[in-house]
Image: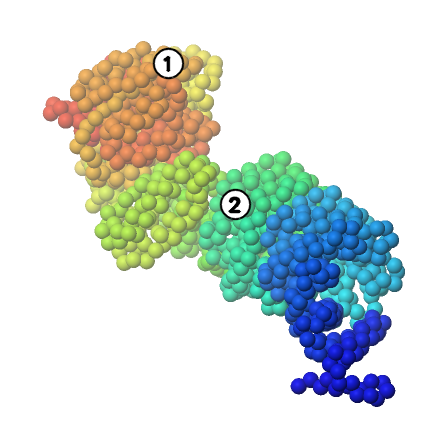
Amino acid sequence: MMNTEKKTNSGVKVEDPSLLALMHRERAGVSIHRYGQTTSLKDLGDAIESGLLSVALTPDTHPEFPGRQEMVGVFYGIRYRRTGHIKDLEASVQHGRLAVAATSEDHPDLPRRCQILTISCTDRYMRTGNMEDLEDALRYGLLAVAATPVGHSDTAIRHQCLAVPYHERYRRTGNFKDLDIAIKYSLSAVVSTPLGHPSLASSYGTLAGSFRTRYGLTGDMEDLEAAIKYSISSVTSTPGNHPNLADRLLSLAVSYAARYEQTTDINDLENSLKYNMSAISSTPEGDPGLPTRHEHLAHSYRKKYQITGNMEELEAAIKYNIYAITSTPESHPDLAGRHQSLALSYTDRYRGTSDINDLEASLKHNLSAVALTPEGHVDLADRHGGLAVSYIDRYERMGKVQDLDGALKHILLAVALTPENHPGLAERQEILAVSYRARYNSNGDLEDLEAALKYHLSAVALTPKDHPDLAGRYQNLAMSYRQRYGRTDDLEDLEAALGYFQSAVIITPEGHPALASRHQTLAVSYSQKYARIRDLESLRVSLKHNLLALAATPEKHTELASRHSSLALSYGDQYKRTGILEDLEAALTHNLSAVALTPEGHLNLPGYHQNLAVSYNDRFKKAGDIKDLEAALKHEQLAIDFTPDGDPHLIHRHANLAGSYLSKYIQTKDKEELHKANKLYKYALQLSSALPQDLFNVSKAYIENAAMLSTEDILIAYTVAFNTLPSLLWLGSSLENRHEKLIRHEISTFISKAVTFSLQASLTSLAVEYFEQGLSTTFRQKLQLEHDNGHLRNHFPILSQKFHQVSIQLHRSSQTSDPAVNYHALADERMKLLTQIHQFSGFKNFLLPPQYSYLCSAAKHGPVIMLNFSSNQANAIIILSPSALPVHLCLANISENAMAEYIGKLKSSLDHFFIHSREIRHGRPHKLHKVSSNEPLISVTSWLWKTIVEPIFCVLKSNGIHNGRLWWCPSGSFTYLPLHAAAPIECSFIQSYTPTLESLIQANSKAVSSDDTLTAVGISESPNLGYWARLPSVEKELDNVTLIFGKAAQQLKNSQATTQNVMERIQTSSWLHLACHGQQDLEKPLKSSLILYDGQLELESVLDIHLPNAKFFYLSACETAMGDSKLVNEAMHLAGGFLAAGFQGGIGTLWSIPDAYGPIVAEVVYKKIIGDDNIPDVRKAAEGLHLAVQKLRKEGAPLHQWMPFVHFGI
């Protein structure tokens, strides 16, 4: 029990409680006065003890009770702000509440007591994050203001006190109205305070803080200028010996630092440092505000480091951060924030030096920051975000999945803790995006990269256009697009990356510390674009931005090595383009600088060694100095030694070193060098971290040295390369993009070489398998997407249904390029399902490239002849029947020169006859040459007969096949040649073409409806014909066809034949006849089309449909089977498109045909199809065309007029 018996100074005992209470109150006043002079915590403790004794001796009904509770609450508040002990703050709030509760509503002291309680509740909210405290602060603040008479001298200070919790509620909820109210009360406080009043400086300071906060939300420079203006007023209104001068100097320093962020004016940063220093010099040792001032000074030094890259500035930042932490009591509410600030400085130093100790220190202090921050605290989300960044950094260094999980855990918590309209949401979504991108780098799961893009885009959308962080968010978004480009090889992703990189550079002011980095990343993307499309403009722009980046980087900057390396890349590309030695020397010089400036252990050092090796190798190839080759070997080995396991660059580094050893072998003839190269290539092809395009390219490089390798080694390389094709020609890319890859990677040439190698090795069945993989790749992908496998459905119906649904959805989205559908994610999901299916017994080869045992069934109704040309070698592979082994026939009389000569003759002959060939755009004017005969074409067919067709027919006859059906399956240059026209008129073979063996197999096995309906479409004239001539024979042709076919035939003539009507009939008719103009688009083969009444039916649209009941098409139009000169193996023509859509067979034309022949040929064909029993049979169409062409030939039709008719399919 408390002893209340006391003695006075005269020694007289005082037992009256009221007198004792008064005496203790007076002693409390003496102690607090003495504390104001000494700042001794003992004096403050004495004041609290005496105050508590006074309160204990005062009945709660005593008129002095509220005032004595108020006094104790104020003393506890003073000690809390000195020590940071939460118990003091709790006591301050408790006594403040008792004081207010005991004060009547009309008491003149009520406003003051509400004001004091507002301050205590605000402090506790800022410590604990408990929203109840913040709402109490607002409630008591509003009571204080409402109870204060108009014109009262304390109106200003009470408005100022109320502004603070409104400001804090804005920070918590992001509600802009709260910030506006805070500014309103702060302005009112300033206006209500007379000039010279001692509280005016404080009001200026509060108002400055609110304007600075609003600037942080809006980026409006007027708010920041107001913050600086009122901060200056606050400082100039404060006497030099005032205890709050240091705080006001600090506030001004923070405002200057904020303006520096926007303007990058170095004077603002210097002012920030100056006022920070002044704040510290105005603060006595042991002052509780000193750690805060050290913290802000550290922040300014860190900003200066970001400009100069000078490690001395960063060391100063770390030093002052450490001062701030070590002088902060353990229970202080600001300790968590100071740990976070120190973590940022350690992160910067880690990124400059790659010292793992700095990374661990950063993680440690971020963990402390989170651990010390109570649940509900306004800064908890931000600290989870900072911790996530440290985990990402350690994951990228160490590769531990636990760190990646930690990053995602904490940033997801940060986002969850952030209200939708909060200004910090954009930054946290950006960190979340970076975390997903890091996880994508770990697992290759495209869903993570798509999530990264989603959150990057959201972060950009949430950022105001004039916000200082927008450029950085553009930069990060561009990085993710560039990363997706590395995965998808889709040029649209690279263009998107370039667009955002350019935007980042454009809105970054001159002198901004990030400008050099943004110039560099833009330059790197232009280098990638140059590598892709080889345009000089991209090379020029890349060099320009790399030079700007280097010029903007100070000498001691930690990123200087990176700038040199990037510039070296541009000079190296320019040397390879121009051959100018000065460019090569410049590349070598900058690569040397990059290596010299990079400390051992730095993450970028392996890449710099590799780049330097490339320059030495280039100079060796130029000058032949073996010293350069030795230098290249040295740096390539260092690059491998310094590259961690699992790094995707390892494949290139091993392949490059292998290439250098091969060069040395060529120089020295030392087989040991060859052995080293072979070993390195083999190792490179086994690396699981390699990207598909890298595996393909390294396999090609390995195979190019085939003369030095064993058959087994070459087969290994070919197997790796073929296994990469599904990923390289990924279904998540658009059809146009996949076509571009086929051309850029020269996949048809590569496969032709693989076929030739297999034949030389007497592996004929393997040659057939390789050959098939090189034909109509994208059409086969379409068929796979539409394939509904009954075997899978019977065993795993749910999985089968899901796989089929995803496949169909992917097919539709990739054809239509619907922006609302994420076909990248669909392709990734399909790949995962396919991997799952392959795990089941009996489904190991599901949808994998077919083997010969399946492909040979293409010859079920007649032999199939595959033609391959590569490396000056022409070969035929003949599948005689499903039960026979393939027969290899070397076409020894065909050379590359002969092939080029006769293809040239064919094109020239067609040009003479005013006929379009593959290289001539439809409608291009030609100079008409006088030709007396078909002699040039006859020489072509004669050559075809002697060198190709007759030798093959001899093989067939020697195997007992003298007549009947046969199918040509040409590849490469053979696709240009009219093989079917080479045989003499009395030939008894009925010849067809097939784009692939599998398409012929599927057409033969397809189960179709017995319902035979024919739609005959004809356009003799229309407003859409343009420069195309009228086709007067079309009506007769349609009448003949429908008459022969009978009641099941319908016509769409002229105005009826709109694109919509025709598309509808295509999908409902099993037989289709189209008589109109056609054209092959040589620039964009997917735009090849049939000319209808109101528009064009494009190949792209045909590929977008799936026709399970379709049987036969007849394209009585020009150029419907011409194909594309760049995609020779893709059957990229309308006839091929109709086959891919589901028709079993059909007739098309290689080039223009006479209008008059349309009815003649169609009549013979359809009479054969219908037959004597009046039942349409798709298998009779080929014979019908054979008879029709024989009829034309017997009637003397010129060679070039009957030759274009060709049959496809069964």
The quarter holding residue 962 reads: top left
Instruction: Give yes or no for contact between labels 2 and 1 (Cβ–Cβ under 8 Å).
Output: no
Q: Residues within 10 Å of mark 1 (few under 14, many from 20)?
A: some
Q: Amino acid at mark 2?
A: Tyr
Q: Nearer the viewer, residue 172 or 300?
A: 172
As helix, strand or loop, the secondary structure at mark 2 comes to helix
Q: Is residue 335 visible?
A: no
The quarter holding residue 1137 reads: top left
**Measured along the vertical axis of the image, is residue 1206 above or below residue 371?**
above
Left or right, 455 with reference to 923: right
As helix, strand or loop, the secondary structure at mark 1 comes to loop
Q: Nearer the viewer, residue 906 or 302?
A: 302
Expressed as whole percent of the image width and height from the top left, the position of residue 395 reads: 55, 62
Expressed as whole percent of the image width and height from the top left, the position of residue 575 reads: 65, 42
Numbered circle sitting on residue 1022: 1
Mark before the other along the chain sequence, 2 or 1 = 2
Say which residue label 2 marks. 485
Q: Residues within 10 Å of mark 2 (few under 14, many from 20)?
A: some
